Amino acid sequence: MAPIIENWATVSGTVKSIGDHPEMEGFKQITLSLKESKEVEGFPNLAEADEGEDIVINVRASELDKANAEEGKHFQATVRKAFGQVYFLK
């Protein structure tokens, strides 16, 4: 098993889609075309490796309105990378 690295980054790009998480009850998924990531002071920026790619950001359904994400619109948020190109909203 790979070690877990505490990491945070501020990501920005265009929302491609928003939908239900296929496995996690009460979660939504934002698919983001990741344009840029910025370091959060004191934490490694693991999102930098995914710039130019689509990433999936998991967010609690109850928090989706606060995230202010809309399909086709610019989106920026602080996230933690879990594995692959899967992230969780802070």
Image (tube, grey):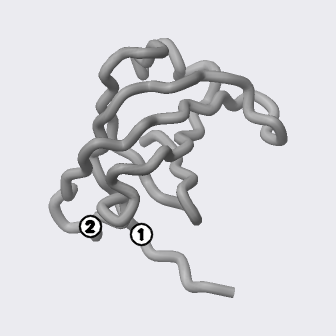
Query: Is 64 left, or right, of 51 in this rendering?
Result: right
Q: Contact, CB < 8 Å: mark 1 with mark 2?
A: yes
Q: Is residue 4 above or below residue 34?
A: below
**Position in image of residue 84 (x %, y %):** 57, 64
**Position in image of residue 16 (x %, y %):** 50, 26
Query: Is 2 left, or right, of 78 in this rendering?
Result: right
Q: In what element is the residue under mark 2?
A: loop
**Front position in the image: 45 or 90:** 45
**Front position in the image: 46 or 6:** 46
Q: In what element is the residue under mark 1?
A: loop
Identify which residue is drawn at 52% across, 50% down: 87
Task: Mark 1 or mark 2: name the one nearer the start of the chain.
Answer: 1
Quarter occupied by residue 80:
bottom left
Disc 2 target residue: 43
Query: Is 81 left, or right, of 52 in this rendering?
Result: right
Of the 4 image quadrants, the one containing the N terminus is: bottom right
